[in-house]
Image (cartoon, rainbow, N blue to C red):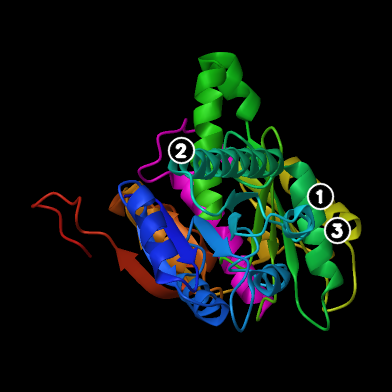
Amino acid sequence: MDHIMLIVDDTELNREILKVLFQSHFEIMEAENGEEALETLQGCQGSIDIVLLDLMMPGTSGFQLLERRKTLDYFKNVPVVVVTGSGQMEDQIRAFDLGASDFIQKPFIPEIVVSRVNNVMASSQRMLSIEMEAQKLKIKSELDEMTGLCNKTTSELAMNETLKACKGRLDVMLVIDIDNFKAVNDSSGHQAGDHVIRIIADLISGRFRKSDLVGRIGGDEFCVLMVDVPSMEIVHRKVNELIQIMRYKPNLTIPEYVTLSIGVASNGRADTSYPELFKKADEALYLAKNNGKAQYREYGVEPVDADKDERPALLLLSSSRSVCSTVQTLAPIQLRVVEVLRFEDLNSLGERDKKNIALMYVDVSDLDEDTTPY
């Protein structure tokens, strides 16, 4: 049985008559007074589908129970059919004013009792269906249909509200753009483009915390608000991880030439708004795109010139895309990664790299048996 009925009546005979009428279609629960009914409703927390309520009971009457119903979350949405022996129209009107859905007159006429309960249940189910459909439409209006992420409008509103709540908290915005996306649509069609969007949306959303906000704000553009970040080093590692995964694409079924460019801007632990922070991140994104793509730029921070980067080198020797992606992602920020595909290429390293190697990672998984790994 899918539905539960609560019968509230101080007379056992009345409860038995109603139980016989409905026990084949409902799981029946009983209460002989108002207080017992409230305890049952509270214990069931929304699983009761309909209440048959006697109006005239000692202690808490049916009228008083209907009054309390308005303030109780576990009761206020449960349909109530009042049971009354009173022939006074005033009692019926009062019951309706207090939220009753219908009434049953004593003594019971089975056909009328069943018909009225069925009508109330059908009406309740229709209302529930309408509410669920409205909720679906509300959710649909807030989400990007292709990716399931927040759409542009919802992202702006949610991120702006989150930034307003900042009190000395470090929040960081990332604006992420798919490089060369137009080429995917032009060469492979819009279905291939949609596939790339979904893959990258999953990639981005899967690498941030539940407290961070992720949205799709354009055809090939995403926005992330990292909330209450402990340090910018974490941000740098996160954006570098995304860029390296898209650079090497381990197990990603998207074209080789598709990469990511990212603009980064922080609130500096000061009050700001979504438009202000987005503008800064978008300017940083422009610099990343204009400087060759597949990289990130941080607003207000000068990038390190690769030729002048004096950090010790981590020499990475591997031809595996998966290995290169992992090492690039996990490498300490204090080291710069220098990639070499083959042993023969070691001779082509510059003097700066040869003299400043702090760590070497050699991937021996794809070496020939006759190759000596040194």
Which residue in the protein does label 1 denote?
Answer: 282
Nearest to the eye among marks 1 and 2: give it: 2
- Mark 1 or mark 3: which comes first in sequence? 3
Q: Residue at x 85, y 65 (%)?
A: 300
**In the rendered view, does 280 fall on the left or right side of 130?**
right
Q: Secondary structure at mark 1?
A: helix
Q: Secondary structure at mark 2?
A: helix
Looking at the image, is 156 positioned above or below residue 61? above
Q: Residue at x 49, y 50 (%)?
A: 108
Q: Residues within 10 Å of mark 3 (few under 14, many from 20)?
A: some
Mark 1 residue type: Asp
The C terminus, quarter of image: bottom left
Q: Considering depth in this image, is 306 or 207 the residue closer to the camera?
A: 207
Residue 285 appearing in the image: no
What segment carries the magenta color?
231-259
What whole-number distance in Å separates the C-alpha atoms at marks 1 and 3?
Answer: 12 Å
State if disc 2 and disc 1 touch (CB < 8 Å): no
Which residue in the protein does label 3 denote?
Answer: 274
- Mark 2 or mark 3: which comes first in sequence? 2
Residue 252 on the magenta span: yes
Nearest to the eye among marks 2 and 3: give it: 2
Residue 185 point in image, percent of width and height: 59, 19
Residue 79 point in image, percent of width and height: 59, 54
Q: Secondary structure at mark 3?
A: helix
Which label sits on residue 257? none
Q: Considering depth in this image, is 68 or 342 the residue closer to the camera?
A: 68
Mark 3 residue type: Tyr
Q: Considering depth in this image, is 349 or 373 the residue closer to the camera?
A: 373
